[in-house]
Amino acid sequence: MKIIGTGRMHPSKVVTNQMLEQFLDTSDEWIKERTGIAERRLISSEHLEDMAAEAARQAIEDANLTPADIDYIICSNVVNEYITPSLSCIIQGAIGAKCACVDVNAACSGFIYALDMADDRIRSGKAKNVLVLGAEEPTRMVDWSDRSTCVLFGDGAGAVVVTEGEGMLASRLTTVSKTDCLYYKRRLEPTPYITKEEEFGPMYMNGREVFKTAVLSSARDISTLLKQTGLQPSDIKYYVLHQANMRIIEAIASYLKLDMSYFPHNVDRCGNTSSASVALMLDELSRGGKLEKGDKILLSAFGAGFTTGAAIFEWTK
Ligand code: ACO
């Protein structure tokens, strides 16, 4: 498959580190030094499904298609206001498409899992044009009095349209069940019969453990894909990495012995937008005129699970 259209939507509310200093025991200096984040965009009045539908419309228009041309919608999402129906069903109605829809949850790697699923769908001949989204509001999972987590996140929705073609050169997905270092449990409705103890509360994250696992797993995925395709690190124009923390991106750059010009980033302006981050970055690069036909780009993400996803694309647009 190949990517033929991209789109994105950010919430309007910009929250700077200085704004967080007003109610948290934190500082602009600490947040910038440890994460690279200066500001993030947070949902205030918006609904995630509306933002995702707008990103989808942009991607479809960019692909020179109409919603009627879309044969399948896959939306990567961890949480939104609905448990059911899925976000992709709501997006389908909002944009006026008619195809089958499904959501996937592979945490921050979910957009790459969704792309891989789209590739399978296209290869099998069951779909021609697939709309793939990453739409996330991780700021609704964290405790806003916990300085170690809430400063990290932002919200957003990114979309691509993929179709038959020779763009995706390789992909790799991995999952290792390691559920104790990053999780969020929701409270479900009570029943008269529940006797078990149930734990719920805001997202729990062991930041150091996630940091180490992220660097090691992403570096491993990148090396594996480069080897598999016979490419050298410098043959890749851009490494579009999950935007969790600038230090993670810098550690991977140093492992590959590449300078930071290969690593476009938005974490400084958007925070960690979970599985939306790679999709947002792709649209930013494409609309910013940074991608030329024939460029090779490598996507790599990691997230709760622990999941990882990586893919190499040749830009064909
Ligand atoms: N402001 C000021 N001080 C803080 C803050 C804050 N916002 N947060 C934590 N601290 C303090 C801690 O309390 C601790 O103080 P202490 O030494 O008195 O106990 C000190 O800073 C150091 O804390 P560490 O947790 O050791 O700091 P570290 O350098 O590891 O940075 C961070 C923390 C930024 C969370 C880092 O571990 C990290 O980025 N980890 C990866 C997180 C990540 O990417 N998560 C993604 C989650 S979802 C996903 O995308 C997979």
Image (cartoon, helix red, strand yellow):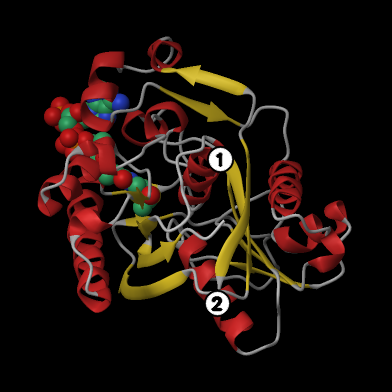
Q: Which residue is mark 1?
A: 140
Q: Against 223, is 134 above or below?
A: above
Query: SS class of the residue under badge 2?
Result: helix
Q: Which residue is mark 2?
A: 119
What residue sits 87% from the left and 65% below the top?
68
Q: Against 250, is 221 above or below?
A: below
The single residue placed furthest to the bottom in the displayed view is 124
Residue 188: x and y in percent read 63, 60
Q: Is residue 295 left or right of residue 85?
A: left
Ligand 1 quadrant assignment: top left
Residue 38: x and y in percent read 37, 21
Query: SS class of the residue under badge 1?
Result: helix
User: CA gap, disc 2 to disc 1?
Assistant: 31 Å
Q: Local crowd at mark 1 within 10 Å, few (<14), some, or many (≥20)?
A: some
- Which amino acid, mark 2? Asp
Q: Is residue 313 left or right of residue 26?
A: right
- Which amino acid, mark 1? Arg
